[in-house]
Amino acid sequence: MKIALMDSGIGLLAAAAAVRRLRPDADLVLSSDPDGMPWGPRTPDDVTEHALAVARAAAAHGPDALIVACNTASVHALPALRAALEPGIPVIGTVPAIKPAAAGGGPVAIWATPATTGSPYQRGLIQDFAGAAQVTEVPCPGLADAVQYADEAGIDLAIAAAAALTPADVRAVVLGCTHYELVAERIRLAVQPSHRPAGLPPVVLHGSAGAVAAQALRRVGARPAPGAAPGAGLTVLLSGRPAELPEAALTYAEGRLLGAVSPAR
């Protein structure tokens, strides 16, 4: 079994690690676009063009499914990707986990890129899935880029700025960009400040990696087998070129997991 994942950058690591945990025996193809990133400021047509190029590079390796591990690409390019690849290769998009976050009750914050925050797409998801929950949209300028390049100071500054915009009484934070999941623990600490109202439970973070990984396995008719023997292959494509995992990827637990279990080839 071979699962491909695509993103503009290393945000795909979270979903790739989730697939690896569920099926250590699955081959993985990681296809990203360092030459063309960031995708967020691009027009929808431009995002679609880049996403198709990255997806076709992955498809050339014959995966059983493709995970679009990128919120921006899922917003703008998912129909085009499905038209190009399905039914031969099932395409699984990424959607912010607003519904499960709202189901927990209490106020919710959605951390997302400035381009996504306040967008008709995100507002539509809030309307469809948030129910009666109070939702605060929090733009996170610079956070995805800082994560991409493992800029520790930049990550700290961007998280602190976003945390300052997050109401102190939120019960859940939705991570609306796949890059953010790589620094989830740092975000968790930042949104549980000392001035948080007494008696409130810890803030729950909601990412998409686990859900899309499970959905990919369902689409290929495979069951989770976390005890399967490891040693599956890992193919890394950077703007279509075979490569190794970027050095920045190895600064995150998810990247180290992938590199340790199956070095890139």
Image (tube, helix red, strand yellow):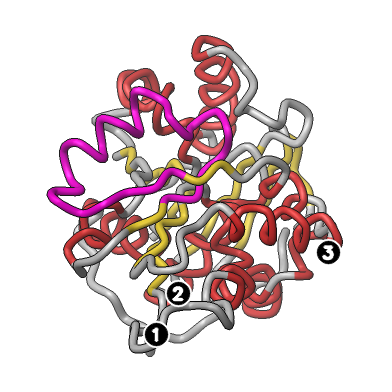
Where residue 182 sits in the image (x, y, percent)? 61, 64
Which residue is painted at 29% across and 33% down in the image?
Answer: 88
Question: How dense is the environment of label 1, judged by Cα within 10 Å: few (below 14), some, or many (20 and up)?
Answer: few
Tell me the SS state at disc 3: helix
Residue type at tag 1 = Ala
State the residue position of label 1.
228
Question: How dense is the environment of label 2, judged by Cα within 10 Å: few (below 14), some, or many (20 and up)?
Answer: many
Q: 4 or 231: nearer the eye?
A: 4
Residue type at tag 2 = Asp
Question: How dense is the environment of label 3, judged by Cα within 10 Å: few (below 14), some, or many (20 and up)?
Answer: few
* CA gap, disc 2 and disc 1: 6 Å
Mark 2–mark 1 CB contact (< 8 Å): yes
Which residue is painted at 50% across and 57% down in the image?
Answer: 166
Mark 3–mark 2 CB contact (< 8 Å): no
In this rendering, position of residue 260 left or right of residue 14: right
Q: 184 or 149: nearer the eye?
A: 184
Where residue 3 sits in the image (x, y, percent)? 43, 54
State the residue position of label 3.
152
State the residue position of label 2.
25
Which residues are the magenta region?
A: 110-137
In this rendering, position of residue 96 left or right of residue 158: left
* CA gap, disc 1 and disc 3: 35 Å
The quadrant in which the N terminus is found is bottom left
Which residue is painted at 28% across and 75% down in the image?
Answer: 224
